[in-house]
Image (spheres, rainbow, N blue to C red):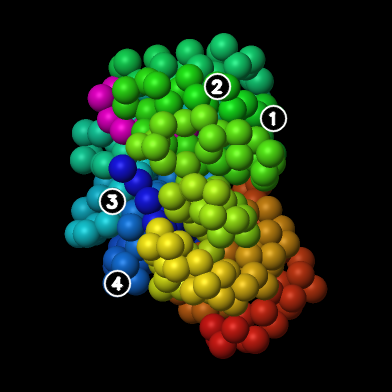
Amino acid sequence: MFQGCATALITPFREDGEIDEQGLRQLVAMQERAGVDAIVPCGTTGESATLTHKEHLKVIGIVREETKRAKVIAGAGSNATHEAIHLSRGAKDLGVDGVLLISPYYNKPNQKGIFRHYEAIAKAVDVPIVVYNVPSRTGCNITAPTVKRLSEVPNVVALKEASGNMSQIMDILASVPPEFSVLSGDDIITYPMMTLGAKGVISVTSNLVPELMVKMTHAAVEGDWAKAREVHFQLLPLFHDLFLDTNPIPVKTAMRMMKRPSGVFRLPLCDMEQATAEVLRKTLRDMKLL
């Protein structure tokens, strides 16, 4: 159902800390022009942890209104199952094509609890679900056997896999059915994951260079591995530098440097150190993005 390049969209804020609605609409239009396959609002990159539920649904609604061609996969996860159901229902009512659900964080459920969390949401809301595994953020990993079980739940259609564990990733790709989409959650390993059978990426980098991320993933989908590898290496410095600090600090800083809607951070996120920012600025200059 989902493949190619999906952009994990930032949420631009005004100087007073409120959502920059006009800027958000501009960002969606830019992504649409670049030909991305999907737009993902209100994920980690969208600073979802600092949005109220009302703001969360407002951002999803704006993105849905402005998106004419690409699919919308709305971040709707929570560590409380009932909250994830509430947000997923709200996203569905706004007409999204799917929801991205991070695994429960902080409370550290076992694998049975993780499975039951997603199963409960799938039973409560008839919407395509993308499971999101990012143990560095959540404190617990979704194992390959659990992913296999989840792939058998009717409306669980995809996995955003950001464990960075290539052994686990291979186990997942070997075990899930062909129609189940495994998507990279880490730009730097998108190319190797796609050589193994992953179908695309939910990307931070495509906030800056969506055309190149589209070019790389579409080449991989079409089996043009030489072209995909060439773009991968072209983007490698950016892949590194966008994680010099906690995501989305570097990508929003880069967008500010590129004069695109970005704005301030909401605490506890804040500006990166000046010396680190200059490393990022040099990479952007070297890639002729400034």
Secondary structure category for the residue under label 1: loop
Q: Residue at x 72, y 62 (%)?
A: 244
Q: Which mark is residue 33?
A: 4
Please state which of the two labelled residues, at mark 1 or mark 2, is closer to the viewer. 2
Structural distance between the alpha carbons of marks 4 and 2: 37 Å
Label 4 packing within 10 angstroms: few (<14), some (14-19), many (20+): few
**Residue 40 placement (x, y as % from top left):** 40, 50
Q: Of marks 3 and 1, which one's residue comes earlier in the chain?
A: 3
Indicate which disc, 4 or 2, sits on the residue closer to the N terminus.
4
Q: Amino acid at mark 4?
A: Arg
Q: Position of residue 169 (x, y in %)?
A: 61, 39
Examine the rendered structure and indicate whether residue 187 appears above or below residue 259. Answer: above
CA distance for labels 1 and 2: 16 Å
Can you tell which of label 2 and label 3 is closer to the viewer?
2
**Mark 2 Cα shell of 10 Å, populated few (<14), some (14-19), many (≥20):** some
Going 56% across and 13% down the picture, which residue do you hit? 113
How would you rate the neighbour count of disc 3 (Cα within 10 Å): few for under 14, some for 14-19, many for 20 or more? some
Relative to residue 85, is residue 163 drawn left or right? right
Q: Which mark is residue 139?
A: 1
- Foreground of the two, 89 or 172: 172
Is residue 141 something that shows in the picture? yes
Q: Residue 44, relative to residue 17: is it above or below? A: above
In this rendering, the label closer to the viewer, 4 or 2? 2
Q: CA distance from mark 4 to mark 3?
A: 13 Å
Q: Nearer the viewer, residue 274 or 225?
A: 225
Query: Could you say which disc has been placed on residue 146 in the image?
Result: 2
The residue tagged 3 is: 71
Residue 83 at least partly seen: no
Q: Does the magenta run of residues contain 126?
A: yes
As measured in the structure, the alpha-carbon distance from the residue carrying label 3 to the one carrying label 1 is: 30 Å
Callout 1 environment at 10 Å: few (<14), some (14 to 19), or many (20+)? some
Report if the CB atoms under discs 3 and 1 are less than 8 Å apart: no
